[in-house]
Amino acid sequence: MTKVIATSYPPQPRGSYIPAALTQYCMNGDAYIPATDAYQICCGGRRVSYSVFQEDLREQLRLKKLSREGNRLYLGRTLRYESDASERLALLLADQTVADARIPDKIQVGSVTLSEEQREAVKLALSNRLSIILGGAGSGKTTLIQAIVKSMGKGGIRVLAAPTGKAARNLSERTGMIARTVHSALGLFPDEDFLSPVIWPTVDLVIVDEASMMSLEMLAGFLCKMNSACHLVLVGDPNQLLSVGSGNVLPDLLHLGFPVCVLTRNHRQAEAGHGLRRNVVGFSQCHGLNDLTFDESFALQEMNEAQIRMQLVQDAVRRYRQGENVQVLSPYNRATALSADQLNRDIQKLVNPSSPEKAELFSGGQCFRQGDRVMITKNDKERQCVNGDVGVLRIIGGTKERPVYCVVLPDGRISVWNDYEGLQNMSLAYAITIHKAQGSEYDTILLPVSDGFAGMLHRNLFYTAISRARRHVVLYGSANAVGVSLQRTPNPRRSMLVAKTRMALRRAG
């Protein structure tokens, strides 16, 4: 007789599917949804009647998992972030200027002397409680960050942060200073006491790099922690990707009129040909195919859908075999013939084929071989690697049940695992998504531009992809698809941050 063991699970609150569905929906950027759309968004794939949904919604509102303002339906925490941020932004706008900062006529970071526009950016950062510095890829933002820290002089604690682990790692490597993820800097990790309540009063400067990716939660976190003498400097590129999470932070702050300095000089593509340099630097003026410049550094290989995959894979394999610093990018991770997942499989077969002598590991439908190029997809503090790190897989021992393997990173770090768990947070990296590439640089970028990407590829994705290249960009596909991508903007994000900040200003004044 089979013995059945009854397992008791805590009952789920009635309607718990509603905040779960709303959370997933708002990951695309909306701070709220119209209450009139709630049934469709939350019950699109569920057999729930409208009357039952209304009862479930009332229960979630009672539990304060959700909040309602007029016709706007929020996750409870998101409404708090928006309300807290708007009140504090209003205070900053009412008393923004700290002092008229005096800076030397000549500011030098290492062997680099700051340009006039960089000097103005330093002055802006030191003279205001909240300032914004915008610059395209390769415009010298990292050098500027070093200069701002240096110009603050001695005294307080300076905090460098970025929204993702990879961006924080890049910032730390480029500046030689400690940089953390925003969540770590805000003390949201249990073992992180860096910005504890005891330390915050001594923080006089916070610089956030890759600020286009800041969410509403991140902005509210810093504004609530800052003391009255602290400077918050947001450094970003408005043409790059917005946050994964609710909020329209950088555009909203610009709309509110916070002081901004725009860097126009390009340094990353200084060695690139005319086409790549012109397209990256002048991207804001590129709204169609005829606005792009094509040459050896920025090439379009026109071909039909069936040819793209074959030609792209062939070129990628040749370049990888030659040891070039090349990266294949795709808008999609899975589900298409030109997704990063499929391109990885195709390239791996040719660059690192199976053989009886070559060790292999299998996890999540992926095959990993000795010598594969792989990406870490989850922060791992114990092994000192972050989401976005790319290295070479080495299988170094163990058994079939408990293999021992490591990832050798470009800077010499070696992260070791002795079970299959690490493979669940790892993927092949011969091809990666454009989102994963943000914040990284490569000599050459190979990018499929298919008519089939019509629902995905837009201006910000296209710019992020091409601006990762230092020397060459090769596009494979349709001239029409390129033109359409340049004309398509990301969907507008629902946000009340601007309106609420202005209301708070009127109440105060």
Image (spheres, helix red, strand yellow):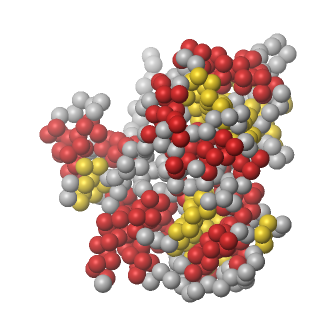
* Residue 90 picture quarter: bottom left
Q: Is residue 6 visible?
A: yes
The image shows residue 64, relative to residue 423, as above or below, that is below
Residue at horizontal 59%, vertical 35%? 433
Q: Is residue 104 above or below residue 356?
A: below
Q: Is residue 384 left or right of residue 6?
A: right
Quadrant where the image shows the C terminus: bottom left
| Viewer-nearest residue: 354 or 297 | 297
Residue 426 shows up from this direction: no
Say above or below: 442 vs 133: above
Quarter-of-image position of residue 500: bottom left
Picture quadrant of residue 87? bottom left
- How far across and how far down the image is residue 49, in percent? 17, 34
- Residue 36 relative to residue 360: left or right: left
Is residue 311 or residue 431 the one in the foreground? Answer: 311
> How many marks do you count on the picture?
0
Residue 343 location, x and y as percent? 63, 23
Residue at 52% from the left image edge and 32% from the top image edge? 482
Q: Is residue 37 above or below residue 200?
A: above
Quarter placement of the N terminus: top left
Residue found at the very far left of the displayed protein = 51
Image location of residue 66, percent across then percent down: 29, 54
Instruction: Using residue 255 as the reference point, say whether residue 366 is left or right of it.
Output: right
- Residue for point 42% across, 77% down: 93
Q: In front here: 127 or 287?
A: 287
